[in-house]
Amino acid sequence: MVQVKRTPLVDQAADLLFDRIRSGEWTLGSKLPGETTLAPQLGVGRSTVREAIRQLAGRGVLSTRQGSGVFVTALDTPEDWDTVLRRADILAVIEARTAIECEAAALAAERHTPAGLRAIRQALRKRAEHRSEIESHVDTDTAFHRAIVAAAHNPILLELFDSFTPRLRGAMIDMLRIRKTHGGDADHATHQDLAKAIAARDPEAAANLSRAHLESLKNALG
């Protein structure tokens, strides 16, 4: 016998309730029927209704008032809640990248060896070759930025970057899926300019380019 998993059922019930709210069945400020009424209407148990209400309350659509019931507090949400949470995580990752990569870029400009510069340029070429598919683009982009961190010759920064990479990869893939565009010529030119600033041993320009690039990622998320 196949059992229906609880979490998807809760999501389905929440979606049904939300659709009814958006359709105007309940107006702003109105009180929802009780769990015993909603459960058979939604085809689920009372506990599932309770969880669905809790989910919509977390999204700001419903409000539970002790002893009074559940009330409609919004008729819609600006965007899918999963997207909101993903965007918040992406912003946190970009802020962490800024803390690590801007300093690393400046240090790389000061400290890079010929071998380190060759690694940066090789990673940049590979990045240019993998701009069409999201996952490979993120992987080659990450390899480019790692080469810069390695060229900074600070083992702590490199350790931080490496430990951070799995979280970074997931967030960057999510970001590109949300944006639906990636790998443009202007974006790649920014990375070329960063490599040139490092090669020119200009730490201020390298740090500024790194920061401006990461700020542009934040701004693109809205």
Image: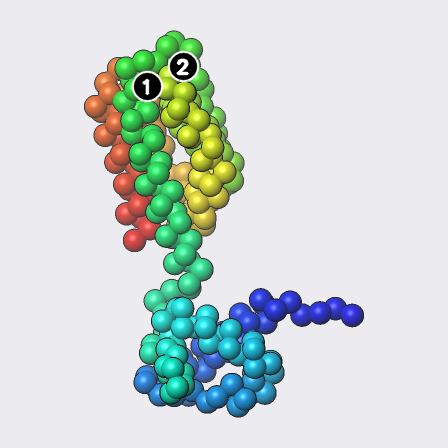
Residue 214 vs 205, above or below: the answer is below
Between residues 18 and 178, which one lies in front from this camera angle?
Answer: 18
Amino acid type indicated by mark 1 = Ala
- Quote the CA–CA distance across marks 1 and 2: 9 Å
Q: Are marks 1 and 2 in contact (CB under 8 Å)?
A: yes
Residue 150 vs 92, above or below: the answer is above
Amino acid type indicated by mark 2 = Gly
Residue 54: quadrant of the picture: bottom left
Residue 64: quadrant of the picture: bottom left
Q: Residues within 10 Å of mark 2 (few under 14, many from 20)?
A: many
Residue farthest toward the front in the current orientation of the protein: 67
| Mark 1 vs 2, N-terminal side | 1
Q: Please indicate, yes or no, whether residue 180 appears anywhere in the rendered image.
A: no
Question: In percent of the image, x 36 and y 45: which residue is there?
Answer: 92
Query: How did the renderer colour the structure?
Result: rainbow
Between residues 130 and 1, which one lies in front from this camera angle?
Answer: 1
In the shown orientation, is residue 14 left or right of residue 105?
A: right
Between residues 197 and 95, which one lies in front from this camera angle?
Answer: 95
Q: Residue 48, how many percent across, how many down?
A: 56, 76
Q: Which residue is under mark 1? A: 108
